[in-house]
Amino acid sequence: MIRCAYSLLLVLLSPLLLAWMGLRARRAGGRWAVLDGTRFGRYRAAPPAAGAIWIHAVSLGETRAAQPLIRALLDRGHRVLLTHLTATGRAEGLRVYAADLDQGALQQAWLPYDFPGATRRFLRQYRPSLGVLIERELWPNLVHAAQRAGVPLVLASARLSDAALHRSQRLGGLMRQAYGGIARTYAQSLADAQRLERAGARQVSVSGNFKFDVRLDQDKAARGRAFAAQLGRRVIAIASTREGEDRVFIQAIRRVRDRAAATGAESAPPLFLLIPRHPQRFDQAAAQLQAAGLPFVRRTRLLELGDGGSSALAACRQAAVLLGDTLGEMPWYYAGSQVAIVGGSFAPLGGQNFIEASALGCPVIVGPHTAHFQQAVADAQAAGAIVQASDPDQAVRQALKWLDDPALAAQVGQAGSHWVRQHAGAVARVINGIEDLLTQRIA
């Protein structure tokens, strides 16, 4: 009865919800297909072969988080259906799995809106053997349709904050039914597991965070280190910045440059790498750098000049900032940096993944807003792998201190890489559970 009321409300509000999606698509850019038939579970193509493992990664962050799991499933010979809700997630999937898409081992699709008919038609079209929802993407009608179709669902690398738990509880039995419809839940931490159980999840266990199992492109990392060695400058990465953070970090960089000029510092100011989280903000960040009077060069320009060549090195030596306007190159950026400041945490946005930087031995600074990575931040701090700063100015000051004390910076970086290795193994635990469920389903 509660789900029926939810479905009716969803239908009544659908014009507003679709208008909101259209506005979001216009602001974000990219291909969203807001009114495409597949968003409503209507398909022109013939149904593909049944039996793929369906993985839903709503957006860019979840798509990247799911990468170790997807790669492991493909390596074991499983076919994968990968769904998204946002254009950034879909574009990342297209980029990362281009070869697997060509070979037919992986297929991409939009997840339909959570209308009862749309979710039923989606499952009837693709007939997956099992579904894996990444982190916390849970929709009541989708879960109900999967139960009716006999498709077991797994919630993997799951997290649930106190605020999200309270929102779920305010919805009463609706979300409790949805969580109760999940066959197995693999939580990132014990605290997440406890909150998920209070939300209504069954068969909850702690498997860890997929982000610790990330497979970094070692060739890109090696090229990043080689470029930094040839450049001969100290480098600070300011990575995964979100809305509103670029401006305040650009101001902090401007102040560093002004102080160095005023004091006649013997050593040149470091090169800052500014790497916005979303590609639609690359041009905006470039305009802000220009307005601040900071000489900068784009990463795409370095690639045009010949990555690692004399012209690219000369362009970087003349710049105050290297604007990271490429996708899929975080190993290059982090490996070429002596310190990483990870954004998304200097505004109330929950934080961004800092584990890649730690995995590459880069000492890390995060801001005060890390609700999405609360347990990881606490564990990393206890391991001596990261430092938390209150604002961008304090973060930049801490980064400069580490540049002046390379031994301490190396110690923090080594603690970070050791901490990441200690926490690996989440993917193996979840795959064992997936294959166990598949065996039970066959039986």
Image (cartoon, helix red, strand yellow):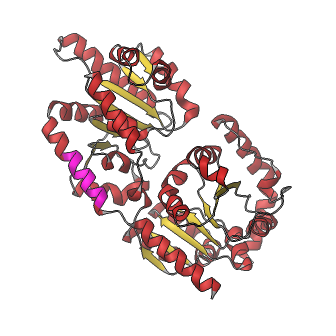
Q: Whole-percent x and y of residue 177?
A: 63, 77
Q: Whole-percent x and y of residue 424?
A: 35, 62
418 within the magenta span: yes
**Residue 376 visible in this rendered orientation of the protein:** yes
- Residue 387 lies, with reference to residue 71, above or below; the image says above
Secondary structure mainly formed by the magenta segment: helix
Image-based side of 316 in relation to 125, left or right:
left
**Residue 85 visible in this rendered orientation of the protein:** no
Q: Residue at x 80, y 66 (%)?
A: 121
Image-based side of 49 in relation to 42, left or right:
left
Q: Nearer the viewer, residue 58 or 361?
A: 361
Q: Quarter of the image holding residue 336?
A: top left
Q: Whole-percent x and y of residue 199?
A: 52, 73
- Residue 146 lies, with reference to residue 246, above or below; the image says below
Q: Quarter of the image holding residue 41?
A: bottom right
Q: Quadrant of the N terminus?
A: bottom right
Q: Residue at x 42, y 40 (%)?
A: 330
- Residue 388 lies, with reference to residue 195, above or below; the image says above
Q: Which residues are magenta?
A: 412-421
Q: Quadrant of the C terminus?
A: bottom right
70 within the magenta span: no
